[in-house]
Structures are given as structure tokens and as C-alpha cells.
Amino acid sequence: MRPLLALSTAIDRLNEKVGYVCNILVLLAVLVSAGNAMIRYAFDYSSNSWLELQWYMFAILVMFGASYTFKRNEHVRVEIFYLFLSERGKLWLDLIGTLFLLIPACLLLSYLSWPFFMQSYAIGEMSGNAGGLVRWPIKLVVPLGFIMLALQGVSEVIKRVAALLGVVTIDATYERPTQ
């Protein structure tokens, strides 16, 4: 179990670093958005590349932020079942859901989105907008984001199995968001 827990720790560290980058991207996206709006209204000038950069950053935040959110146990779950379970029941539900739903879905979506990226890369796809950005890099974010989420799923499965075996103790408590 020790090598698997080391793998889980490595995946967790990777997703912590990804989360840090995503946090910086939030600030950058706000700055680009505000700067673009100010320039558009103050100087009556607009650039498609800046507009596309905004949605590129948003896409990266969503796709890579999912694995970070999952790692921090802040993801959406079906509370109606989860709230009535014991700690072991929660561990089992997390294990089964991650192993049989999350990981296969992420791997399938990554597999299905890979040709979408490859076709774009092969033709050197560019934005259809004047002054737009290259499209294939952002299309690579889709399969990579799902792979990162699947990897975090593997980490969570390892931790849940270790907890069920009594090797580690994890906090499976889920608090509803206050919004």
C-alpha cells in the first residue's frame, strides 16, 4: 500500500501546483478582461486576440481546476445519499463512484477529444476572427484536463482503499457550500 500512497501523494502535489497556476490565471483573466474593456471604451479599440485570450484562460481554469477542486473535496456530489451514510459508507460511495463513474467517463472523454485536438494540430488551425489566436493549443486542454481529473480520481481511490483498510485516516466529511 505504501507505493500506492506515494503515487497518490505525487498526484496530489501535481494537482496542488495546477491549482496554484489556476489561481494566478483567475487574476490574469480579470486583468485582461478589465484592460480590454477599458481600452475598448476609452480608445474605441478592440482586439480579437485579447478576447480569445480571455476565453482560453477561462477554459484552462475550468478544465484544470476540476482536478484541483476534486482534490480539495469541494466538488459537487449527490448529498441526499452522502449525508445519511456513516464514515465507512461515505468512503465506499466515494470509492465506487470514482472507480466506476468518474475515471471511466474522464478516460472516455479524453479519448474522444484527442482526435478533435489532433485534427486541429495537423492543419495548424487558427481562429476564424481577424487577429485571432492559434486554436490547437486550447483544444489540447480538453483531453489533458480530463486526464488530470482521472489521475486525481486514481489518487482518491488509493486514499479511500487505504482508509477502508485502516492504513490511513481521511476526513470524508462534506460541508454544503454556504451560497
Image: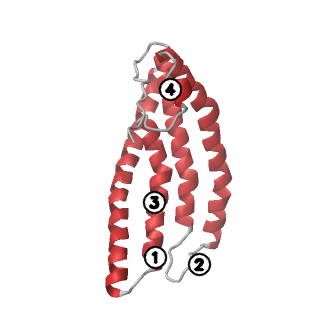
Q: Look at mark 1 in the image and give the residue it sits on.
A: 49
Judging by the rendered image, the residue that carries numbered circle 4 is: 158
N-terminal-most mark, 2 or 1: 1
Q: Are marks 4 and 3 in contact (CB under 8 Å)?
A: no
Amino acid at circle 3: Phe
Q: Nearer the viewer, mark 4 or mark 1?
A: 1
Asked if disc 2 and disc 1 are in contact, CB closer than 8 Å, the reply is no
Amino acid tagged 1: Ser
Q: Is residue 171 left or right of residue 151?
A: left
Number of the label disc, if any, that sits on residue 36: none
Gap in Å between the C-alphas at discs 2 and 3? 19 Å
Lower sequence index among marks 4 and 2? 2
Q: Residues within 10 Å of mark 4 (few under 14, many from 20)?
A: many
Q: Secondary structure at mark 2?
A: loop
Task: Specify the amino acid type for callout 4.
Answer: Ile
* Marks 2 and 3 close (CB-CB < 8 Å): no
In the depicted structure, whether residue 130 falls above or below residue 68: below
Specify the amino acid type for callout 2: Gly
The residue beneath circle 2 is 128
Nearer to me, 157 or 55: 55
Q: Is residue 74 above or below residue 43?
A: above
Count neighbours of disc 2 (C-alpha within 10 A) and say few if under 14, some if 14 to 19, many if 20 or more: few
Mark 1 is surrounded, within 10 Å at the Cα level, by few (under 14), some (14 to 19) or many (20 or more) other residues, namely: some
Q: Residue furthest top?
A: 166
Sequence-wise first label, 2 or 3:
3
Q: Judge the density around disc 3: few (<14), some (14-19), many (≥20) Cα neighbours within 10 Å.
A: some
- N-terminal of the pair, mark 4 or mark 1, is 1
Residue 24 in the image: x percent, y percent?
A: 33, 56
| Alpha carbons under labels 1 and 3: distance apart | 14 Å
